[in-house]
Image (cartoon, rainbow, N blue to C red):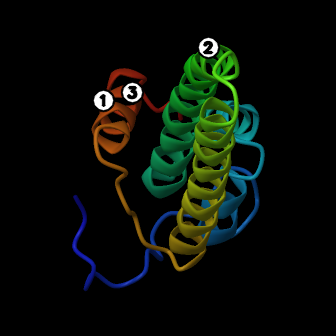
């Protein structure tokens, strides 16, 4: 995990032509879609590549979690009133949590800082380590 006191990333320019902090933040804009786009486009800057990879991992994990939750909600909706309330609260909680996480990730990237989401950040690091940077 990166140090919260580290200075913002200046380093290598982005292959996209954008400032690295802007490219890193935009990698989260549409989740895995922009993550894949920036991972394919970015050939030089490890900061942008990390945020693109983390966007893919987090986005796919949230999609899977959403599918599992929707199946669970179907079961809960069979229970009158209490089941409905629990299903609605779970759905609202997941939606709010995802939105807050999305904002935090974009903000941290815009600040020029790397913030690893637990588990997903490690996966993202492995992902960019196995895909060589093409000059």
In the image, 114 versus 57, the foreground residue is: 57
Give the alpha-carbon distance from disc 1 to disc 3, as whole Å.
Answer: 4 Å
Q: Position of residue 67 (x, y in %)?
A: 64, 18
The quadrant the N terminus occupies is: bottom left
Asked if 2 appears above or below 69 in the picture, the reply is below
Callout 1: few (<14), some (14-19), or many (20+) C-alpha neighbours within 10 Å?
few
Mark 3 sits on what residue? 127
Mark 1 sits on what residue? 126
- Give the SS element for disc 2: helix
Give the alpha-carbon distance from disc 3 to disc 2, as whole Å.
Answer: 36 Å
Residue visible at 70% across and 37% down in the picture: 41
In the image, 55 versus 64, the foreground residue is: 64
Mark linked to residue 75: 2
The label nearer to you, 3 versus 2, is 2
The answer to whether marks 1 and 3 mark residues whose Cβ atoms lie closer than 8 Å is yes
Upstream in sequence: badge 3 or badge 2: 2
Asked if 104 appears above or below 63 in the picture, the reply is below
Upstream in sequence: badge 1 or badge 2: 2
The label nearer to you, 1 versus 2, is 2
- Give the SS element for disc 3: helix
């Amino acid at each position: 995990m990166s140090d919260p006191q580290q200075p913002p990333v200046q380093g290598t320019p982005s292959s996209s032509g954008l400032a690295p902090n802007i490219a890193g933040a935009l990698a989260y804009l549409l989740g895995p879609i922009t993550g894949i786009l920036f991972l394919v486009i970015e050939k030089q800057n490890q900061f942008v590549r990390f945020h693109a990879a983390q966007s893919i991992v987090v986005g796919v994990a949230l999609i899977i979690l959403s599918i599992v939750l929707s199946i669970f909600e179907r079961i809960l909706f069979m229970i009158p009133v209490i089941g409905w309330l629990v299903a609605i609260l779970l759905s609202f909680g997941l939606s709010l949590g995802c939105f807050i996480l999305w904002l935090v990730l974009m903000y941290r990237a815009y600040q020029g800082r790397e913030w690893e989401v637990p588990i997903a950040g490690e996966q993202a690091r492995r992902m960019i380590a196995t895909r060589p940077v093409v000059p």
